[in-house]
Every structure is written in C-alpha cells, then in structure tokens.
Image: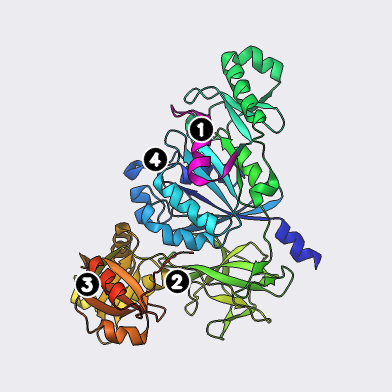
C-alpha cells in the first residue's frame, strides 16, 4: 500500500452521535469542539426559544425548537488525529436522515440520559447501528443530576440492546453528587471542578487512591465496591469485541458541566476504528490506496441563502481526493468537476484542497448528484445503495399564493432530492396532485417551513387518507388501478408505489392475489 494515503486514513476517526431527544447530544457535540480547541467558550444549550444555537444546529427552525433536524458535518483536529463528526437529527421523525448519516461513519457514540436510560428512539437508532455493524461507545450523561443507579443502567443496556457493557470509567459520588470518575483501566481517580455555566474546560485533578479514600470517604468506598463487582464479572473494555459490535465501552459524566467529556473524546481516538476498505455492491473491498472513490450520503440546499446553493456531502472511501479533479458518477456515467469542494463546519465552509478516506467533503453546486450516488476517478465502482425507511404519514400540499407555483415546484423537487420528504407523483397530473410521504409529522413542518423561508412559497399541508405504502411494478400496477381505494404513483427514483387507504384492504389483496408485487419499504 502507498504509505501517504493509508497513513492519512489511519489518522481519521469518522463517527456520529446518536441519542433520544433531550439526552444531551448537541451539548456533547459542542463540548467536543471546546476540548479540541475549536471553540474558545461553550454556551449552555437550553431548550426551546431560550436556547443559544450550537455550532452544529444552523437551520433557523432547529434554533427555534432546540432540536437537531438536519444532520451536519463537523471536522476538527484532536491529539494528532482528524475527527469527522456527523451530527444526526435528534427528533424521532428524522430516523431516515439518521440512517443515511450512519452509512458514512465508522463508529457511534450513544448518549443516554442517566435518569431515563434506554428510550424508544434509542432502541430504534441502535437497530440501525446493528444493521451496519457499527462499534458503539456509550456515554451515560447528566450524572450531575439525580438519576438511576449506574449498575441498573448497565443491566438495561445488556437486556434491551444486547451489547455487553464494559465500563471504562466509573462514577465517584451518587447521581446528583458527582465528584469524579475512576478509570478502571488505570485505577486513576479524576476529580472534576465545575466552571461557570460549563463554558470552559473543567479542571481535572488526578488523585492517588490513598488520598481519594481519605478525602472522598463513603463515596470512594461505594465506587470501589461497585468496581469490584465489575471486576468479578470481567466487564473490562475489550477492543476485539467492541469492534465486532458485541460490547460497548461505557463512560460516565455530564456534558453540561464538562465532567468526563475528555475521556470520551480520548476513547474515540484510542478505540474507534480508522477507515477500512469499503465493500462494493459485489461485496469486494475497495482498497484504501486505490484511485479516489466516494459516495453521496446527503444533499442539502440553501445552506448559503445568498447563493441558493446545493451541496452534496460525500464520504471519501479510497485514494487521495484533490480539489479540481474530475470524478465520474456511476449512475449517470457523466463526469463531475470538483472545483468547488469544501469542508463544512456547521453552516460555515472552507475550501478543501485534499481529502483522504474517512473525510467528508461538500461538493458545491452538485446539481447532478443524488443521495446514494457512487463516484470514482478511473476504476469504476458502485457502492451499495442506502435503503429507505417506509413512510408512515402522508399529506398533500398546495401553494397559498397561486402566483408562486414556479417557486413551489422548484422547492418540491429540491426537498424531494434532499430526502426531507418523499414526493410521490402521478405522471399524468404532475406536482399539482403530488402526495408527500414521511416517517413522521415533523418532516412536513420542516418541509413547509423551508418552502416558505428558502423558496418564498408558503403552502398549506393537508392530511392525505392513506394508511400503507408498498413498492410495486408495471404489471401489478395495472391490476391495482382497477381496485378502489388504491393509488399508484411514482417515487423520485422512478419506482412505482401503491398507496392504500385501508390496511384491511391491503391485507385482503395480499391474501387474495399473492402474485401481485407488493414489497415492503424497509431499512436494512
């Protein structure tokens, strides 16, 4: 292998943070940047309208609601490594965008609220991680507040998620009276000191065991007893089982006060895997030192409102990317010039001249690139497609101002390409009779907000009377159109879908006419 590309790839750590809403994901993201020296001061992340906007939440609607809606790429240096952090949507309605982001990372940090433990969204997100065999680092957050016993949380992780928890750090002091952590790998006790509103790095003091026993008293004894139990069951960090997706190193802390944040950031460097050769659709690995290849995992428009641009976010899979090089899109066979290539930090961007496997590059004005496209320099490659989640809610939309029809159609096409919603069209009627399909209701709110703000096309969203959706083909579509209560439309990728007003009707058809093609739309 050629040393420069492989050496640069080994310096990369590309990861995502996943959590249930309000578990502290965006706060942890901001504190990672603080500890990496990217931010001079961190602002306390507050919910709703009183919340200061974090670096990763650039969209106006995100700042108003205090949630992450659109995944964002952040790249920064730490301990001689290049860390690529892909922030993921924090609301349950945006699991499809999360899936696309997780297709581009090599590891995951799972944030759990220590007072709540495993929540429904946590389970759903972890299933996506499992489907991709992603190694998971767990952070028990908010330990500075009253919460549950950490041993109880470990049992819940193992029972509900199926990962064997292996605590790397363990708290001294009960939840709500957090003193510091014991590093079970070294035996060191780190005592933390609060800073004003958590805006600065928390001072850390390494305390010898004898001194800790004398100064921390019963809190130290209790922590040592629990560490003894963990030792007895051999719940030790094990790199092979972590990389195999069988165990999860566990860290305890508080992102808000910066307690334990450094330990997690260090673990990403020390434990998370560097980029590996990516498998193509035939299951063959693309060598890291081969010529340049990449795939598009996200498309985002209007990050720069003044230019109305369109950025395709690509994960570099092999070779050395150089700005200005020409890449071929496998789907179209057409060349794509990369003159306007950027690294993206929240809504800010900087021209990038080169990138290596694991890096995320934003290709500006990529009007011909779609989510899932494979790109290559010389040797053709097609990477596996990114599956979709099945929509669960449906709606129609109409412009409130008929004079804005052109803007409405433009916005409809753009947001469909981005995957904000799926736009299902009737070939004979076009956008006027389009049906919007989404995983959750909030996607429609974002769709309407962005049409209004970015395209100056305010709309009214109306619920559509459909309960189920299936993929179908031309032959089956002819028969389905003869049956009442079913509508056959075309998805953005050209696939035919059948919408059913009644789940009972769908079940009857599946039983009575099993030869019809009615495939589930699933992620996996």
Compared with 330, 133 (above or below) is above
Rendered-image quadrant of the N terminus: bottom right
Instruction: Report the disc number at residue 399.
Output: 3
Residue 457 in picture, x, y percent from top left: 26, 70
Residue 519 in picture, x, y percent from top left: 39, 73
Instruction: Report the disc number at residue 46.
Output: 4
Mark 4 secondary-structure assignment: loop
Instruction: Report the disc number at residue 257.
Output: 1
**Residue 461 painted magenta:** no
Instruction: Report the disc number at residue 208.
Output: none
Residue furthest to the front: 512
Of the numbered discs 4 and 3, the one sitting upstream in the chain is 4
Q: CA distance from mark 4 to mark 1?
A: 13 Å
Q: CA distance from mark 3 to mark 1?
A: 46 Å
The crowd level at tag 4 (other Cα within 10 Å; few <14, some 14-19, many 20+) is some
Of the numbered discs 4 and 2, the one sitting upstream in the chain is 4
Residue 123 in picture, x, y percent from top left: 45, 49
Q: CA distance from mark 3 to mark 2?
A: 23 Å
Mark 2 secondary-structure assignment: loop
Do labels 4 and 3 touch, CB within 8 Å? no
Of the numbered discs 1 and 2, the one sitting upstream in the chain is 1
Residue 280 in picture, x, y percent from top left: 62, 73
Q: Is residue 338 visible?
A: no
């Amino acid at each position: 292998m050629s040393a420069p590309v492989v050496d640069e790839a080994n310096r990369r750590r590309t990861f995502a943070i996943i959590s249930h809403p309000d578990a502290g994901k965006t706060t942890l993201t901001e504190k990672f940047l603080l500890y990496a020296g990217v931010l001079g001061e961190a602002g306390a992340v507050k919910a709703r309208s009183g919340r200061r906007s974090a670096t990763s939440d650039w969209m106006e609607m995100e700042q108003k609601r205090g949630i992450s809606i659109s995944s964002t790429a952040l790249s920064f240096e730490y301990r001689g490594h290049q860390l690529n952090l892909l922030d993921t949507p924090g609301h349950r309605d945006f699991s499809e965008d999360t899936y696309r982001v997780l297709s581009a990372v090599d590891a995951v940090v799972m944030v759990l609220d220590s007072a709540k433990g495993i929540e429904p969204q946590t389970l759903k997100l972890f299933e996506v991680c499992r489907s991709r065999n992603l190694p998971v680092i767990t952070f028990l957050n908010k330990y500075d507040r009253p919460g549950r016993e950490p041993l109880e949380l470990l049992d819940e992780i193992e029972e509900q998620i199926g990962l064997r928890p292996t605590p790397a750090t363990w708290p001294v002091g009960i939840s709500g009276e957090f003193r510091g952590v014991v590093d079970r790998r070294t035996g060191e006790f780190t005592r933390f000191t609060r800073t004003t509103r958590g805006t600065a790095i928390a001072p850390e003091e390494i305390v010898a065991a004898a001194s800790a026993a004398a100064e921390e008293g019963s809190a130290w004894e209790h922590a040592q007893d629990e560490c003894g139990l963990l030792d007895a069951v051999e719940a030790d960090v094990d790199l092979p089982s972590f990389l195999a997706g069988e165990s999860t190193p566990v860290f305890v802390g508080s992102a808000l006060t910066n307690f334990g944040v450094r330990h997690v950031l260090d673990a990403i460097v020390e434990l998370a895997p560097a980029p590996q050769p990516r498998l193509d659709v035939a299951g063959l690995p693309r060598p890291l030192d081969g010529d340049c290849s990449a795939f598009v995992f996200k498309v985002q428009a209007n990050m720069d409102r003044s230019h109305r641009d369109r950025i395709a976010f690509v994960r570099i899979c092999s070779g050395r990317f150089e700005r200005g090089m020409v890449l071929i899109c496998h789907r179209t066979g057409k060349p794509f010039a990369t003159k306007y290539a950027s690294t993206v930090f929240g809504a800010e961007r900087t021209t990038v001249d080169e990138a290596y496997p694991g890096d995320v590059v934003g290709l500006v004005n990529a009007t011909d690139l779609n989510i899932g496209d494979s790109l290559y320099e010389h040797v053709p490659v097609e990477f596996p497609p990114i599956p979709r989640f099945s929509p669960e809610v449906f709606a129609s939309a109409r412009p409130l101002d008929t004079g804005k029809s052109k803007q409405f159609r433009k916005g409809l096409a753009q947001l469909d390409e981005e995957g904000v919603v799926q736009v299902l069209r009737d070939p004979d009627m076009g956008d006027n009779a389009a049906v919007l399909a989404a995983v959750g209701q909030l996607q429609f709110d974002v769709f309407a907000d962005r049409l209004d703000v970015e395209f100056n096309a305010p709309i009214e969203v109306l619920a559509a009377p459909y309960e189920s959706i299936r993929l179908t083909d031309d032959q089956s579509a002819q028969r389905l159109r003869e049956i009442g209560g079913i509508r056959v439309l075309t998805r953005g990728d050209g696939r035919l879908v059948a919408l059913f007003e009644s789940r009972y009707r769908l079940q009857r058809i599946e039983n009575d006419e099993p030869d019809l093609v009615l495939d589930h739309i699933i992620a996996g």
